Amino acid sequence: MAVAGESLIAVPFAGASSGAEKSPEAEAAWVWVQSQRGSAAIDAVGTITPDTSYPLDWTGAVSGTFSSSGGYPEEVNPASIVVDSPATVSASYDGVVVGHITLQPTPGRWIVQVYRDTGTGLVQVPLQTLVDPTGQFRVDLSSISSPPAGTWALGLLDAQNSYAPSGVPWPAEPVFSGWEVELFVVTDTAYFIARQAARADGTFAFAASAPGSKLFQLVSSDGTVLAQWVADTGLIRSYAGQEVTYTYDQAIAVVTALRLGTASADLVTGLMAMQLADGGFVNSADWRNPWAGVQVQRSGVSAIATYALLLWLEVVGTAGSLAEQVMVAAQQGINWLLAQQRSDGLIGAGVGDFNEDGSVDVTASPTWVSTEHNVDGWQALRLAESVLGSQEAASAAATIASAAVALLWDGSRMRQGLDPSGEPDDTDTLDVASWGSIFLRQTGQATLADEALAHASSFAASVGDLAGYRAYYPQPAFPDAPANVWSEGSAGVVLARFVAGDSGAALTDLQNLSALQDGSGGFPYALVDDTATSMTTALSTCASCWFILATLAQNGPSIWD
């Protein structure tokens, strides 16, 4: 599926920043982000399109057309039976038919079964003949005195396989040699359903499908995908070469698009597809079917997603049908966040959790608390006060501001949070230092904000000649944390320094961060793969967007302004 990219500065919104216009690196990063629309590793040379948009619950027949801009292979007849005489077998013909089979002749194995093709399927008539050892057969249609309506058809039965139908019945439409059309459905991933030879008339039809997003491919015999169609959901893939979209990354992409001056209608529509009926957001889903995302809802993810919806309303406006949908989704997101606030004033972890066997308990209520979730939640609630006029959100934000200092500040830095028993979780993480400093500064705790930002220097690291900040340094929770550079986290430090007014240090860190940019324009999530700290070197939508947001902070609005 080809997806047209949005222009970098498409609409001059008041909320857009001019920073990216002066940064070729930021522009290249956004071009790369847009390239993550559509499937990974599909270099299409043609098109394939269903006749209609099939609902997710559709299990009936599906059909469509395909074409190629790179030429076509030779046409062949795929039938397993060849009629040698007569030259034409009309619907009313009642004589002898002589022919041969294209499968390997085996004495006593192959039986020619006579059918009538009624237009809706093949109907057996009581006439068969055994194929001789040389592969020849002869059948006399005159023995059928009153055949059903339709035209004549011949098929093969395999006497060595319980007389099961085998091969392709005669007559058959010509097909393109070596090409096939494949049908998949996507739920949590893509599942193969069926394939058929690619008809030479450029059409395809499958008798049945299955629940899920329908995906069609035109493929060659060597496995090359020549064309693909799947409905555009508005989602951006989180990592190069993968099909998953993390809701957090989609939300950050919406924020980035808005700050670049793009209305991002498709991106915000995709983000809303990740929202559940209760207002919370799933953590992730296959981009081709966001409605099948795993129903584990984390407060931080839902807070970032809700913030993006609110920012969309603030920047784009509240007029129009799409704005009405965004307004409803944003209010539901705020209601969900409010429902997560605990008696101690903090926002809990969320709803749903994974069992030991990997299954999901959608009713689980984790008792741990994340500082990051509360920082994200405060930002969303604060914006809800101005965009939605919600005094309830304003009150909840004020409560978080007080509770965070009382329960999550350890005297010199922000804790990671509280463990399931309610005890302090003193794991030291970069994001609560950088994002935490922004939060503390915005809540009037300038001294604590300075301390938190100063503590971010503890995470400074380098890999070869490349410098930045890592998510964790070696500590009890991560004793073997490697020297690493985490792009998103490094961008967060840049943003925090700009917010603090330390432009010199921010620009130095930004220059170091820009050195991580790949030739394609994208940024790696990190420089070292490390499963213990959840780091990957894959090019990342999140990392690329955060670089843009850090760049924008020089001259105008970014995130959490």
Image (cartoon, rainbow, N blue to C red):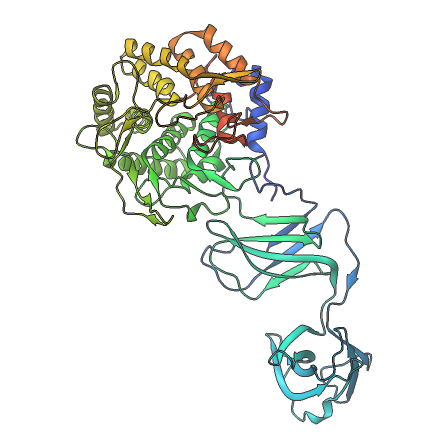
Q: How many marks?
A: 0
Q: Which residue is drawn at the image coordinates 58% and 22% (left, top)? A: 517
Left or right for 406, reference 383: left
Q: Nearer the viewer, residue 332 or 326?
A: 332
Q: Quarter of the image containing the C terminus?
A: top left
- Residue 277 relative to residue 16: left or right: left
Can see residue 240?
yes
Q: Position of residue 426 (x, y in %)?
A: 29, 23
State the residue at coordinates (29%, 35%).
349
Which residue is farthest left? 343
Rendered image quadrant of residue 364: top left
Which of the two residues, 438 or 475, is positioned nearer the viewer here? 475
Relative placement, left or right, of 305 versus 19 is left
The front one of 507 and 451 is 451
Residue 381 locus on image (x, y percent): 29, 27
Q: Position of residue 438 (x, y in %)?
A: 35, 16
Q: Residue at x 42, y 11 (%)?
A: 498
Task: Give the quarter of the figure containing the N terminus.
Answer: top right
* Viewer can see residue 148: no
Asked whether 548 or 394 is in front, the reply is: 548
Above or below — where is 455 with respect to 256?
Answer: above
- Quarter of the image for residue 281 reads top left
Q: Residue at x 27, y 36 (%)?
A: 335
Q: Position of residue 168 (x, y in %)?
A: 68, 71
